[in-house]
Image (spheres, rainbow, N blue to C red):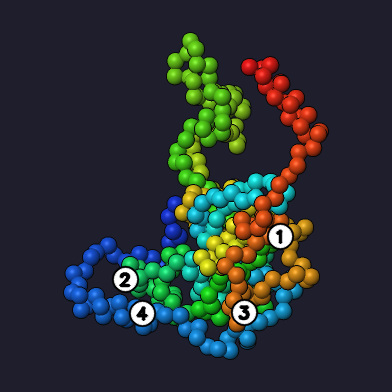
């Protein structure tokens, strides 16, 4: 059994859910409902799966003090594209847009409860930590099984398309049903983004590992082959770790230390610097506070803790990083120096000679 569990938990990627997970989708059938029955189901859905966070004192009770040892919940976002921005020094940068759609806390476990759920291999990794289950993008409960829809009854929410479990500290626990917004973070914060890389399927060594392949002239069926993969005699067989054809993409990837440049509070869109967020456009990713020591949060500028709660003061639609040039600001004109002009002329002469 030890070999079985070793192979089970050390997979590079999983293409199917674990057997102990609750069945998610309902049986594939289309019931012939009348209009009255369909209206009854829709009314039941609106009545029993609405958010219960209408308690006026909930936000005041949930405000806590952040410490450097605190660990907040993250967000589930959907990658929606890449967008250019300009800094105040004239530099053009690319940003990735991540939309936080309908995020809620589904359930929380304190450190003692979470310790009983952690598998044996991760007992030291999550020692002393609590856990929060968050979901994104509500959907109609008729599409899901009764067991999966029952996970959201305590929070009073409809089933979510995406669920994830986030390790946090005990002081960052939130009541079920708490909404999470893009303003959980702020422009200028550094975050880590986790996701799955783009799926490419089974690929050869030329595309997967950038091999040169064989010589294309005077050869047959040799242009895209890897060549020798091992030795004979005592060292027979392929070398361990040899790069060979196989499944490419859909790898777990974490992009560490990404800066937030802008936040749209109306559409809950986060603009992060760089186009390297893992995954295709439309895929889900997870955003957390960064673990890089030099870029971690400090007590001088603490974040909203345990999360952002809408108050009486409304935030502007767009929140910008201090270095970002806004389009409504005055145009910045840069005067070219003599040294820069000389370098430009020299570069033009060299390009003309090369032609």
Q: Nearer the viewer, mark 2 or mark 4?
A: 4
Q: Position of residue 245 (x, y in %)?
A: 50, 34
Contact (Cβ within 8 Å) of mark 2 with mark 1: no
Can you identify the residue that label 1 sits on?
A: 322
Label 4 environment density (alpha carbons within 10 Å; few <14, some 14–19, many ≥20): few
Q: Position of residue 219 (x, y in %)?
A: 47, 13
Label 2 environment density (alpha carbons within 10 Å; few <14, some 14–19, many ≥20): some
Task: Give residue 117's quadrant in the image.
Answer: bottom right
What is the quadrant of the C terminus in the image? top right
Q: Is residue 227 left or right of residue 139?
A: right
Can you identify the residue that label 2 sits on?
A: 142
- Point 24% across, 75% down: residue: 38
Can you identify the residue that label 3 sits on?
A: 313
Can you identify the residue that label 4 sits on?
A: 46
Q: Nearer the viewer, residue 348 or 308?
A: 348
Sequence-wise, the earlier of marks 2 and 1 is 2
Task: Give the total of numbered labels.
Answer: 4
Q: Nearer the viewer, mark 3 or mark 2?
A: 3
Q: Nearer the viewer, mark 2 or mark 1?
A: 1
């Amino acid at each position: 059994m030890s070999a079985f569990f070793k192979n089970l938990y050390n997979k590079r990627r999983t293409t199917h859910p674990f057997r102990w997970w609750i069945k998610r989708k309902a049986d594939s059938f289309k019931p012939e409902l009348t209009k009255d029955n369909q209206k009854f189901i829709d009314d039941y859905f609106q009545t029993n799966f609405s958010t219960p966070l209408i308690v006026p004192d909930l936000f005041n009770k949930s405000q806590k003090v952040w410490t450097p040892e605190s660990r907040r919940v993250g967000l589930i976002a959907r990658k929606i594209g890449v967008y250019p921005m300009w800094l105040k020094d004239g530099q053009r940068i690319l940003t990735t847009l991540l939309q936080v759609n309908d995020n809620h806390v589904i359930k929380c476990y304190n450190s003692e409860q979470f310790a009983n759920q952690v598998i044996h291999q991760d007992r030291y990794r999550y020692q002393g930590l609590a856990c929060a289950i968050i979901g994104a993008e509500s959907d109609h409960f008729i599409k899901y099984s009764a067991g999966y829809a029952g996970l959201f009854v305590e929070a009073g929410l409809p089933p979510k398309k995406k669920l994830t479990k986030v390790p946090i500290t005990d002081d960052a626990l939130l009541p079920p049903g708490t909404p999470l917004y893009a303003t959980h973070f702020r422009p200028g914060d550094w975050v880590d983004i986790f996701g799955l890389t783009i799926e490419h399927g089974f690929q050869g060594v030329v595309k997967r590992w950038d091999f040169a392949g064989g010589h294309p002239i005077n050869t047959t069926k040799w242009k895209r082959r890897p060549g020798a993969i091992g030795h004979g005699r005592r060292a027979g067989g392929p070398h361990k770790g040899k790069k060979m054809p196989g499944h490419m993409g859909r790898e777990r990837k974490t992009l560490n230390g990404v800066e937030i440049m802008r936040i749209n509070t109306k559409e809950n869109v986060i603009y992060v610097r760089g186009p390297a967020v893992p995954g295709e456009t439309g895929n889900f990713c997870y955003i957390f506070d960064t673990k890089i020591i030099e870029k971690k949060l400090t007590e001088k500028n603490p974040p909203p803790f345990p999360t952002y709660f809408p108050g009486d003061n409304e935030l502007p639609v767009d929140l910008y990083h201090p270095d970002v040039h806004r389009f409504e600001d005055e145009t910045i004109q840069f005067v070219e120096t003599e040294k820069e002009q000389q370098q430009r002329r020299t570069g033009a002469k060299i390009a003309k000679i090369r032609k």
